[in-house]
Image (tube, rainbow, N blue to C red):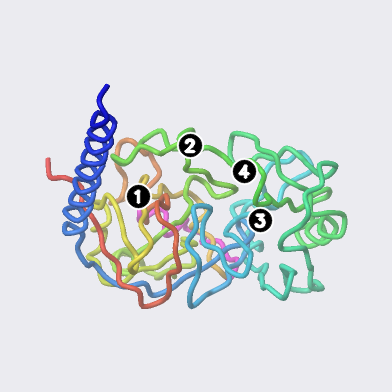
Amino acid sequence: MTVDDPLNLVLALATASTIKYIGASLWRLKKLAKYEFVGKVTALDLYPAKSCGAISLQSANCTRGGLKHSGVTDRHWMVVRDDGVKVNIQQEPKMTLITPSIHGNKLCFDAPGMPTLKVEKNPKEDPSLYVDCKPKVKAMTAMNCGKEASEWISKYLGIKGAYIVVSTENMAKRDVSELVPRPWLNVPETTDKVTFSEVSMCNIAFENSLRDLNSRLANPVSMGNFRPNIIINGSLAFDEDNWLEMRIGESVYMRILEPNPRCLLITVAPDGKRDPNTEPLKTLRKFRKTKPYGDSPLFGVNTAIDREGIIKIGDPVYVLRKPVT
């Protein structure tokens, strides 16, 4: 081998790498050029505990685990029965009246007629407190928040033996690919994980879609019935059916995994009252059902986060549409 051979090899590899980098960059720029502006963020809501109240925010860290603020991540706490099965607002509507707040290193919960419950927002992992729980069908391991929290939630709900669990940052999460059997052109990736939410790291709903729905209702409902993390205004009603990806601001990118199939949970208003006529579910079923989802009408979208970052109210929203077939 001559002296020039190693040099030529290095130059060839460097050239190939440069060409590959330029090609990837051009592909990204071409893709970015296809994004179109559709509206702006009008609300950000963090739900620390599944089926409980929200903390309304001006800005939040949009992470792969969900919205995060001051060390608290969306739906990382959950109420369960003594057998580990979740309790939700369909069974206990007054859970919506449990109001969360963050004070220092504590996550606090208030409820009518109850003293404030304070739990550690970043508890130290203790294997002796590990329990199996069922946020949906498949069981996962979480950590019991302790006796005081158990007594508090049991008394408020009137459910003997109920307790609160938390999934700490390092505990195993659920694989979204096992939870989304009907991919929305975007097949879930192995890095897509959720804790106690149904399938989505971040649930998004749209004001004009709600206006369309409310125009069909005798008694309009609020966005609180749907419990989204991000609310967007500006897009046409249900135009989200045609979207593939989203960008919020200049840094956060997300894939739409599927539309959000709805159930009886949306018949419970934020004030804890259940609609006697099963609205708005009844009306949604008249015009928002599609075959793969059976009797579950669609409202909003479930997303997976590809690039994390800070988002805030007023941020512009851009979308990449599905290819026309």
The C terminus: image quadrant:
top left
Q: Name the residue type under label 1.
A: Arg
Mark 1 closeness class: few <14, some 14–19, many ≥20 residues within 10 Å: many
Which of the two labelled residues, at mark 2 and mark 3, occupies the earlier sequence position? 3
Q: Main secondary structure of the magenta part?
A: loop
235 left or right of 221? left
Q: Which mark is residue 92?
A: 3
Which of the two labelled residues, at mark 1 and mark 4, occupies the earlier sequence position? 4
Question: Nearer the viewer's eye, disc 2 or disc 3?
Answer: 2
Mark 4 closeness class: few <14, some 14–19, many ≥20 residues within 10 Å: many
Q: Residue at x 27, y 30 (%)?
A: 3
Q: CA distance from mark 1 to mark 3?
A: 32 Å
* Residue farthest along the left direction in this orientation: 325
At which x and y percent is residue 286?
31, 50
Asked if the stretch drawn in magenta spans residue 277, the answer is yes
Q: Residue at x 23, y 54 (%)?
A: 320
**Residue with the mark numbered 1:** 255
Judging depth in this view, the residue of 89 and 141 nearest the camera is 141
At which x and y percent is residue 169?
65, 51
Q: CA distance from mark 2 to mark 1?
A: 16 Å
57 left or right of 208? right
